[in-house]
Amino acid sequence: MLRRRGYRLTTQRRAVLDVIARSRDHLTPGEIHQQVVRRHPGVGLVSVYRTLALLADMGLICEVHVGGNCRSYLLRRPLGHHHHLVCSDCGRVVDFSDCDLGQLEKRLAEDTGYEIEGHLLEFAGRCPDCRAATFT
Amino acid sequence: MLRRRGYRLTTQRRAVLDVIARSRDHLTPGEIHQQVVRRHPGVGLVSVYRTLALLADMGLICEVHVGGNCRSYLLRRPLGHHHHLVCSDCGRVVDFSDCDLGQLEKRLAEDTGYEIEGHLLEFAGRCPDCRAATFT
DNA sequence: CCAGTTAATGAAAATTAGTTTCATTTGCAG
DNA sequence: CTGCAAATGAAACTAATTTTCATTAACTGG
């Protein structure tokens, strides 16, 4: 896909893609870098950022904004439109895809005159594990 | 309200509250500080952050997470549950309150075992002014 | 109203996340 | 193989936020 868009397929890009593809979880740029370095020491955090920006541009990954510490998490996109349910304790993320905001979106557009381009929907809650941990 | 919770009512807290109360727009910590300093030179950005954290804790203000540059915007809460429609060009924010996510939330809780605590819903779009500007 | 305590402040340093710059390297077209 | 533009790594930089700590001032009790 990179090639098709005229980008070069470099070792570092391979490495980043590899990490993202391998992981089921959502990772921060820093975490991705750590994992990349394990197999490819010398790969710079900068390249990770650059690759992530590229992938995000191409729509292959997307970002999550969670909690108080407004840090952007990057994650693998499970193909297509979807949203996140984030555990407020451990940060674990569950994806879901049906959000049914079409009507609301339409009404908002009419009421405000905005041309709506997209939306960000995230739920916060406590995952089963963290809930269980409380009762220990 | 501060007093009721055992916090002191300091000049700087008054000043921050004043600015937030006066403004209908959403402000960044930096913007709030600028305005505070106009009337109260010497008030530190630090205190603004501290006051904002306090107010957010008490639920009197809330944050917005917008666009790519993951910076947390703080804003006045128009009382009660609501959401934001943010212009992707100029950043102007419109509030709306009916989101009708109850059913989705319930189903998610059943499916995932998460105890859902809240949600973050934001729409992005282009406001009437910015749309008009394009055609100039 | 005054004094004491203690929370709150301001300044500066520290931290954290992300971006920019630029000389060097390298993928890949020819 | 070779050349060159694209991509990289290191380091400097920007920006936002947090921490530290000595000083200040809000409230409480007298």
Image: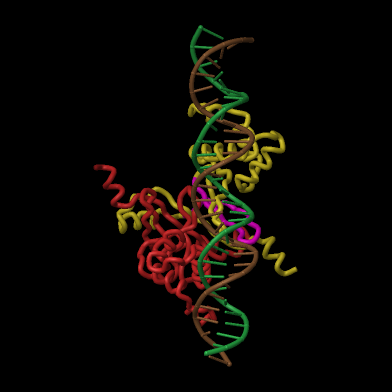
Chain colours: A red, B yellow, C brown, D green
* Quarter of the image that includes the C terminus of chain B: bottom right
Name the residue furthest right. Answer: B136
User: Is the residue B66 above or below the residue A7 in the image?
Assistant: above
The front one of A41 and A47 is A41
Any part of residue A109 in sight: no
**Total numbered labels:** 0
State the image coordinates of residue B46 (x, y, percent, origin top left): 58, 39
Snapshot quadrant of residue B43: top right
**Residue at x-position 61% and y-position 40%:** B45
Between residues B74 and A109, which one lies in front from this camera angle? B74
At which x and y percent is residue B80?
50, 43
Residue B25: x percent and y percent? 64, 48
**Front residue of A80 and B96:** A80
Residue B48 falls inside the magenta stretch: no
Residue at coordinates 54% horizontally, 56% vertically from top-left? Answer: B70
- Residue at x 53%, y 54% (from the top left corner): B65
Provide residue B95's location: percent of width, then percent of height: 57, 51
Q: Residue at x 35, y 57 (%)?
A: B108
Residue B70 lies, with reference to residue B50, above or below; the image says: below
Decide if residue B132 is in sight here.
yes
Magenta-colored stretch includes residue B90: yes
Q: Is residue A8 above or below residue A34?
A: below
Q: For this view, does C13 lie left or right of residue A36?
A: right
Range covered by the magenta-colored residues: B81-99
